[in-house]
C-alpha cells in the first residue's frame, strides 16, 4: 500500500454526507443560536458495516443533540441522542487539550485497505477537519481516536451490511 494524499480520503468521506443529503457543517454552524457543530464521518473499507455520519450540535439550550445517519437505513432519517452539557463540554475540552484546531491529517495513510474517520468542528465561519485511520493511528491521532471512543461512543456504533 502506498501513501496517498489526504484530499483523496476527504473526497470519499465528504461524499458520504453528500449522498445522505446532510447539510454542510459550515451551513449548520451559521444557523441562528448554534454555538458549535461537530461531525464524525466513518467509512468502512471492507463494506462490513454501513458508512455513517454523526453530527453533534449545541445550540442555546442546556443540551446538545447527536444525530446519526447510516447509509441506506431508515430512509436517511437520523437516530437522535440527547447529550447532556457536562458530557458535551468534556468532549469539547478533550479536543482542545489535543489541539484539534491545529492538528494535521494523520500522515502516511494508505489510499485503501483501512477504515477512515473524518472528525470536523465548525463554529461561525471556522471549519476544521482531521482525517484518521483509527487502526493505525498513533501519537496525537491515537489520542483523538480515544477521545471519540470515550465521549461519543454512539457515533461509532456499526450496523452490519446485509449481503
Image (tube, helix red, strand yellow):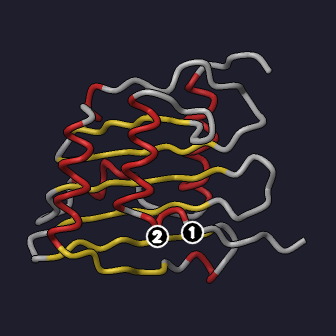
Q: Element at badge 1?
A: loop
- The reply to whether dot 2 and dot 1 touch (C-beta < 8 Å) is yes
Considering only vertical position in the picture, is 163 above or below 2? below
Considering only vertical position in the picture, is 146 above or below 140? below
Q: Which residue is drawn at 61% across and 18% down?
A: 108
Q: Where is residue 88 in the image (x, y as percent from the top left)?
A: 22, 64
Which quadrant would the N terminus be assigned to in this image?
top right
Q: Element at badge 2?
A: helix
Q: Is residue 69 left or right of residue 94?
A: right
Q: Position of residue 116 (x, y in %)?
A: 61, 42
| Quadrant assignment, res 119 | top left
Q: Position of residue 11 (x, y in %)?
A: 59, 36
- State the residue position of label 1: 157
Considering only vertical position in the picture, is 163 above or below 147? below
The residues bearing labels 2 and 1 have C-alpha atoms spaced at a distance of 5 Å
Q: Is residue 19 left or right of residue 160?
A: left
Q: Is 76 or 111 nearer to us in this picture?
A: 111
Considering only vertical position in the picture, is 7 above or below 93? above
Q: Residue at x 26, y 43 (%)?
A: 95
Which quadrant would the C terminus be assigned to in this image?
bottom right
For residue 121, which numbered disc appears in the image? none
Q: Which residue is drawn at 30% across and 53% down?
A: 27
- State the residue position of label 2: 154
Disc 2 residue crowd, few under 14, some 14–19, many 20+, Cα 10 Å: some
Q: Is residue 123 left or right of residue 27?
A: left
Q: Where is residue 158 in the image (x, y as percent from the top left)?
A: 63, 68
Q: Which residue is drawn at 58% across and 75% down?
A: 76
Amino acid at each position: 500500500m502506498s501513501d496517498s494524499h489526504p484530499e483523496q480520503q476527504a473526497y470519499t468521506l465528504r461524499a458520504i454526507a453528500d449522498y445522505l443529503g446532510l447539510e454542510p457543517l459550515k451551513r449548520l454552524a451559521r444557523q441562528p443560536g448554534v454555538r458549535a457543530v461537530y461531525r464524525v464521518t466513518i467509512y468502512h473499507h471492507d463494506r462490513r458495516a454501513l458508512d455513517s455520519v454523526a453530527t453533534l450540535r449545541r445550540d442555546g439550550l442546556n443540551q446538545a443533540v447527536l444525530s446519526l445517519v447510516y447509509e441506506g437505513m431508515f430512509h436517511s432519517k437520523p437516530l437522535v441522542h440527547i447529550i447532556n452539557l457536562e458530557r458535551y463540554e468534556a468532549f469539547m475540552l478533550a479536543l482542545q487539550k489535543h489541539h484539534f484546531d491545529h492538528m494535521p491529517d494523520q500522515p502516511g495513510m494508505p489510499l485503501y485497505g483501512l477504515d477512515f474517520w473524518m472528525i470536523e468542528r465548525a463554529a461561525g465561519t471556522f471549519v476544521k477537519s482531521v482525517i484518521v485511520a483509527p487502526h493505525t493511528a498513533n501519537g496525537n491521532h491515537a489520542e483523538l481516536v480515544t477521545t471519540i471512543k470515550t465521549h461519543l461512543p454512539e457515533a461509532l456504533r456499526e450496523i452490519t451490511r446485509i449481503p
